[in-house]
Image (cartoon, rainbow, N blue to C red):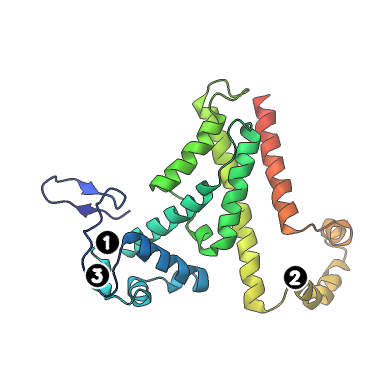
Amino acid sequence: MDTEEQPGDGEPTLVWERPEPPGRAALSPLSRDRIVRAAIELADADGLEAVSLRKVAAALEAGPMRLYRYLSTKEELLDLMVDAVYGEIRSNGPEPDTGWREALRSHAHRVRHAALRHEWFVDLLGGRPHLGPEALGHLEASLAALRGAPGFGGSIDAVLSAVATVNSYVIGAIRQEVADLRAERVSGLNERQWQRSVGPYLERMLATGRYPTLAEVVRDATHPDADTVFDTGLDCVLDGVAARLA
């Protein structure tokens, strides 16, 4: 993450701790919040590739150089955008004392819903933890839901392992779901239309007898909707955590 050297203290300051510059009279007043909201609107409409400081400035009817008073790089802007989405995720948190399974289930669903509202969000998940205040609050809530819960034995390592396992499933599942949605838009075919387009080829390949298990999947599997697929996979992960605790 990019930092900016503050005069006098000799220590780099992350964007989260750097004070916002004082406002000044202008035809188009700016703030970090306005900049971030404009960037999110661009990303929601056309993906992350549509986000640049120049385009955000144009959307705000401001000169690009004015934005550099509020942030130093595009990477800082992306960090702020991610943290704004984590703010949405936290805004409707689970009820207290719902139990660790329901708490993690609620967190997982809220991350998924946020990713479906802001598809670009999933492209920025994974890797090093996000350090914005809203992201840290989300992680704190996830860990706190398990800390001291029955079965975890007061082990912070067990808590961290369980949260990391659920997070890995959620990130992988929503990346696949968003990739499917993007592919549908690019091809112009919905799921049923795509199946019809590849059906004859797939039938010829299955007829060779080389893929008997795949043939059974095509013939007999229920092929549930995306909500059911996500919930079923999440239940498997939570069951695994519970079994390990036992």
In the current view of this chain or complex, which residue is farthest to the left?
A: 8
Tell me the crowding category of disc 1: few under 14, some 14 to 19, or many 20 or more residues within 10 angstroms, Cα based.
Answer: many
On screen, residue 81 versus residue 191, left or right, reads left
* Most foreground residue, 160 or 46: 46
Residue hosting label 1: 70
Choose top left, top right, bottom left or bottom right for residue 72.
Answer: bottom left
Residue at 56% from the left image edge and 43% from the top image edge: 93
Residue at mark 3 to residue at mark 2: CA–CA distance: 45 Å
Whether residue 144 is visible to the viewer of this picture, yes or no, is yes
Which residue carries the number 3 mark? 66
Q: Residue at x 82, y 59 (%)?
A: 214
User: Given contact means CB atoms under 8 Å apart, are the residues at marks 1 and 2 in contact?
Assistant: no
Q: Is residue 227 left or right of residue 111?
A: right
Please report the residue visible at 34 percent of the width from the left and 64 percent of the height from the top. 74
Say what amino acid the circle numbered 3 marks.
Arg
Contact check, label 3 and label 2, Cβ < 8 Å: no
Mark-to-mark CA distance, 1 and 2: 44 Å
Q: Can you give x and y, in whole percent of width and height, for residue 114 in the image?
A: 56, 56
Quarter where residue 77 is shown: bottom left
Q: Nearer the viewer, mark 3 or mark 2?
A: 3
Q: Is residue 85 left or right of residue 185?
A: left
Q: Secondary structure at mark 2?
A: helix
Q: Residues within 10 Å of mark 3 (few under 14, many from 20)?
A: few
- Above or below, 223 against 147 in this view is below
Q: Amino acid at mark 2?
A: Glu
For disc 2, the marked residue is 191
What amino acid type should be assigned to the residue bearing mark 1? Tyr
Q: Name the N-terminal-most of marks 1 and 2.
A: 1
